[in-house]
Amino acid sequence: MIVRILVAGGAGFIGATLCEHLLLRGHTVVCVDSLQTGSALAIDQLRKFEGFSFIKQDIVQILDIGAVGTLDQVYNLACPASPKHYQKDPIKTIETNVIGTRNLLDLALQNGARFLLASTSEIYGSPERKPQREDYWGNVNTTGPRACYDEGKRCAEALVTAYRSQHQTDTRIARIFNTYGPGMQRDDGRVISNFVTCLLDKKPIEIYGDGKQTRSFCYVDDMVGGLIALMASDCTTPVNLGSDHEVSIMELACIVGRVIGKSVEITHCPALIDDPRERRPDLDKCRRVLGWQAITSLELGLRKTAAFFAKTQQAHVV
Ligand code: NAD
Ligand code: UDP
């Protein structure tokens, strides 16, 4: 069955990969994106699919999506995900998560569509429990530099829950953990794009703080499979999606060097304020309820990511 799907944030890193997977399954996809951090090139590549259309619009404004027909599903991925970008205009980040999510929930309500929120592991803040299970309420600084994103997403989860109870909107909440892969922007500022592009450019990499802080990285195709499985499921409570292979940032630097085949020169920089010390999801729920798990090893995913950046670098030079 062909499903009509709106993807907000579909020009972004995860969103563009999601659009492609949905179009390959034969669905009709309307992408709504302001191109704040998204890529016009990604949109051009998606235009080869007949079922694709693009509307350049900010979700904070009242949505005017014209005559696209009745929607069956709405995915909300619209929000800058890299600290570098979401901290640039913190008020806008809060508005995007709260007002933007509300506008999309209203659209889902008008269409009787199912709504999925791309929430984040950041709602756990700097967690005091490991691994992080969905019933952990988190440890978030409400006034730190990450608050606009963390609290914005926490409010978005509360809003989705309120629409569910007050308007019976059919909702899903994905708590996405660190995701990487082809399609990331070179200047995105996140650790994997920074490390890979620095090594390819033969520049030293920067480690913020002691490098003992940990993250668990999930390959983008796996993540998109998880989002689609969650949208198709009956699970209406939040679900962690990610990989539980936890590495320190120092270990990550060594793995990236090994995969690319270059020696790693490290510059140590001051630690970022409120940088979470560790992050690893408990994935029992997504395995049990969705029958989903990430399958791409970090080494293989990094190899594909490095190949992508090497290709885009060449295209840049030519
Ligand atoms: P991204 O920055 O690459 O993409 C976000 C997209 O949203 C961009 O295309 C941007 O232009 C668009 N956007 C931002 N504000 C908008 C607005 N007001 N109106 C319309 N469009 C807007 O980020 P990403 O890595 O693809 O992340 C996608 C979603 O997943 C985000 O909601 C993010 O919070 C969530 N997430 C991502 C990660 C990760 O590791 N990538 C982790 C946790 C959660
Ligand atoms: N980081 C780093 N060097 C970089 C970019 C990031 O040491 O060039 C660290 C950062 O301090 C954090 C981790 O890598 O501890 C992951 O950062 P990222 O911005 O990718 O994701 P997030 O902090 O949002 O999980």
Image: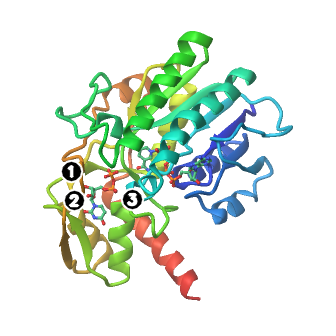
Locate ligand 2 by image quadrant: bottom left
Are dots 2 and 1 in contact, CB under 8 Å? yes
Q: Is residue 19 left or right of residue 161?
A: right
Per the image, label 2 sits on a secondary structure element best described as helix
Residue on which disc 3 sits: 301
Q: Is residue 247 left or right of residue 240?
A: left
Q: Is residue 272 left or right of residue 96?
A: left
**Closer-to-camera residue (290/136):** 136
Task: Check mark 2 vs ligand 2: CB closer than 8 Å? yes or no.
Answer: yes
Are dots 2 and 3 in contact, CB under 8 Å? no
Q: Say how the picture is coloured.
A: rainbow
Residue depicted at x 70% and y 28%: 107
Which numbered marker is on residue 249?
A: 2
Residue depicted at x 18% and y 53%: 213
Residues under labels 2 and 1: Cα distance?
A: 6 Å
Tell me the quarter of the image containing the N terminus: top right
Residue on which disc 1 sits: 214
Can you tell which quarter of the image residue 99 is in?
Answer: top right
Task: Tell me which label, 2 or 3, sits earlier in the chain.
Answer: 2
Q: Position of residue 216 (x, y in %)?
A: 28, 48
Q: Position of residue 169 (x, y in %)?
A: 61, 17
Residue depicted at x 48% and y 46%: 91
- For marks 1 and 3, give the one nearer the viewer: 1
Q: Position of residue 51 (x, y in %)?
A: 78, 46
Q: Position of residue 55 (x, y in %)?
A: 75, 49
- Counting labels gives 3
Q: Is residue 237 left or right of residue 269?
A: right
